[in-house]
Image (spheres, rainbow, N blue to C red):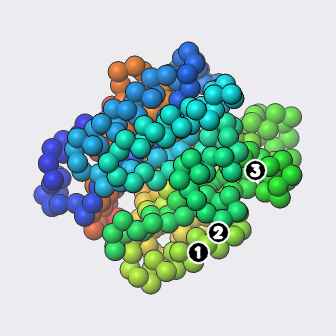
Amino acid sequence: MGSANGLTSAQGTQPLFSFGVISDVQHADIPDGRSFLGVPRFYRHSLLVLQRAVQNWNNQKRPQFVINLGDIVDGYCPKHKSMSIVKKVVDEFGKFNGPVYHMIGNHCLYNLPRDKLLPLLNISNLDGHAYYDFLPSPQYRFVVLDGYDISAIGWPQDHPHTLKALIFLEEKNPNLDKNSPMGLVGLDRRFLMFNGAVGKEQLEWLDAVLQDAAKLKQKVIVCCHLPLDPGASSQEALLWNYDEVMDVIHQYNCVKVCLAGHDHKGGHSIDSHGIHHRTLEAALECPPGTDAFGYIDVYDNMLSLIGTDRIESIDMEFHS
Ligand SMILES: [Zn+2]
């Protein structure tokens, strides 16, 4: 862990509150493997990373809640085990002494359709959508986006959002395998089937939430499984319409930090409006005995991420 050893940080002041973070556990009861880029993946060990994370958060008694940035189960999990493995991972999160806020990732959706997945993740809402907000303190609002709102995975095959995504991919990606970026150049490399988009209704909802937050002088942390800034992510991992989402966010001054997962190597950037983007390193890619989780201390003027092993600690000071 980082240097924090009590209730105060390097700043010398007490945080308003703290929360735990972890991303891309991608557990499966299968032997270790590699990503298509050859990066080792430790499917069984990742559950131990989560167990150590929960133990650590509980022992510290510091995080008030936990945010899971998505992909708790891997696409290679044998399908007849999907339900039991998702439940197993959710149960591990459930050992945390406080609320856990989940979001969906592509790997979760490879295993279970939305109608089965969302109740297990305690995301109960209308029409199978998975975006929501919550207020852990009067000054801070958290917005969780559904990056697979317009997506070719997770919805029934004849759902309008599936059809919209398939038409979109057909237009943007000439490859037969829509998960291949071959021939796509620069930022167009994000037009892959394992990504998705925030739909029109969700954009309108986001706009209304941010308008309200701005009026109430709340600071906002946006969380999405898919990264929202090219500076904090590989081009291949970005939300299809990250630019549209950021256009909405940039209309207001209230969003201070965007957190993401999905791009396993992690990243950090500060965008043109001074907003921090932090993509968290994956728990899946921790060699046995190493970790990738952390907690974030929240102050008036900054967020301080204290990470373990693969997650680099960082102070994210607000620019405006
Ligand atoms: Zn993912």
Residue in the image at 68% along x and 49% along y: 114
Front residue (pair 173, 2)? 2
Whether residue 159 appears in this view of the structure is yes
Q: Locate residue 188 relative to residue 139 in the image: left or right.
A: right
The amino acid type found where label 1 is placed reads Asp
- Which mark's residue is nearer the viewer, 3 or 1? 3
Residue on which the image places disc 3: 155
Front residue (pair 303, 121)? 121
Q: Position of residue 220 (x, y in %)?
A: 43, 67
Residue in the image at 45% along x and 79% along y: 214
Residue on which the image places disc 1: 207
Q: Residue 203, labelled with which disc?
A: 2
Question: Is residue 265 shown above or below 225?
Answer: above
The amino acid type found where label 2 is placed reads Leu
Q: Locate residue 15 relative to residue 248 in the image: left or right.
A: left
Quadrant assignment for the C terminus: bottom left
Q: Locate residue 106 relative to residue 55 in the image: left or right.
A: right
Assign a secondary structure to mark 3: loop
Disc 1 residue lies near ligand 1 with CB under 8 A: no
Assign a secondary structure to mark 2: helix
Quadrant assignment for the N terminus: top left
Dividing the picture into quadrants, the one containing residue 31 is top right
